[in-house]
């Protein structure tokens, strides 16, 4: 039984996987980390984790593994894993959450895909049908775009508007502008793979984007957890350095 932990910039996503499916998935605030153990319906036998939340979170995850006396396997980016090859200039600099999402995308879809993680930041990554990761973009997330305008301008509000094709008030203009900017980046990236490429969309802001994206598009809950589960299963099958050396989590998504 694997306990999968995705320590993101804003929240901790966790899931208990029995090798064939999820027994539990939860999203917690960082300060509710200790509540995780109490919510587990049964004991895990190992932990598979990725971290982009910094050194303090890495230490908390390692302390949890020590307290539960469980082996801990960190997923960090590498040149290749689980059928995915990494074309980043320095593969190890790719954010671990992006790498996990790419592993999941390759397992869930047989063709080319644009892998979009819409959270605190939005990442838009290109994955060929062969499993080759070609590269991608990092944008401020929808909330960050809106709050940046409110914090850095004298007259613009912290908008609570709605999406409109042609907004006619300031709140709607800000909300719609952030969504339009993100949609445009996704569609421009999709063109480089071909219009048949599916958009695999996950993250806390995914539901705001999904209704406005051109098909084909799939909304997938907790894509990073899916990648962690597949990586953990592969580690059991091939427990050596061909997958990745065991190491601590990446401090920042890049």
Image: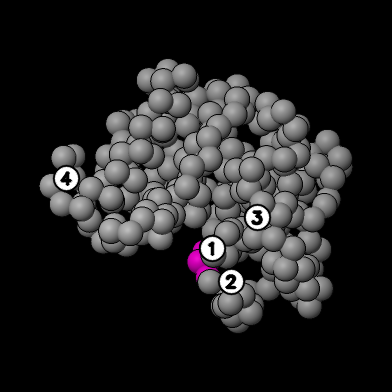
Image coordinates for residue 44, horizontal then vertical, percent? 69, 68
Mark 3 and mark 1: span between their CA atoms?
A: 10 Å
Mark 2 and mark 1: span between their CA atoms?
A: 7 Å
What is the secondary structure assignment of the residue under circle 3? loop
Instruction: Give the residue pinned by disc 1.
Output: 10
| Quarter location, residue 195 | top left
Instruction: Give the residue pinned by disc 4.
Output: 167
Q: Dividing the image into 4 quarters, which one contains the C terminus?
A: top right
Q: In this view, does 57 lie above or below 229?
A: below
Image coordinates for residue 72, horizontal then vertical, percent? 78, 61
Colour mapping: one colour
Dot 4 alpha-carbon crowd within 10 angstroms: few under 14, some 14 to 19, many 20 or more: some
User: Image point 54% across, 64% down: which residue?
Assistant: 11
Labels 2 and 3: the sequence-earlier one: 2
Labels 2 and 4: the sequence-earlier one: 2
Labels 3 and 4: the sequence-earlier one: 3
């Amino acid at each position: 039984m694997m306990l999968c932990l995705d320590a993101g910039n804003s929240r901790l996503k966790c899931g208990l996987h029995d090798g064939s499916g999820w027994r539990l998935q939860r999203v917690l605030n960082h300060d509710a980390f200790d509540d995780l153990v109490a919510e587990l319906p049964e004991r895990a036998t190992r932990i598979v984790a990725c971290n982009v939340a910094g050194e303090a979170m890495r230490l908390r995850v390692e302390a949890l593994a020590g307290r539960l006396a469980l082996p801990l396997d960190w997923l960090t980016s590498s040149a290749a894993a689980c059928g995915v090859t990494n074309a980043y200039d320095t593969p190890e600099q790719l954010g671990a959450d992006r790498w996990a999402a790419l592993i999941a995308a390759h397992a869930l879809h047989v063709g080319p895909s644009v892998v979009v993680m819409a959270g605190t930041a939005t990442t838009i990554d290109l994955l060929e049908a062969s499993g080759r990761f070609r590269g991608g973009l990092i944008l401020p997330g929808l909330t960050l775009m809106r709050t940046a305008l409110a914090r850095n301008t004298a007259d613009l509000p912290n908008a609570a508007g709605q999406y409109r094709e042609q907004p006619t008030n300031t709140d709607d203009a800000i909300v719609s502008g952030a969504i339009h900017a993100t949609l445009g980046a996704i569609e421009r990236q999709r063109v480089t793979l071909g219009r048949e490429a599916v958009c695999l969309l996950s993250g806390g802001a995914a539901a705001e984007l999904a209704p406005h994206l051109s098909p084909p598009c799939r909304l997938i809950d907790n894509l990073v957890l899916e990648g962690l589960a597949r990586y953990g299963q592969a580690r059991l099958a091939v427990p050596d350095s061909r997958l990745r050396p065991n190491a601590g989590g990446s401090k920042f998504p890049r």
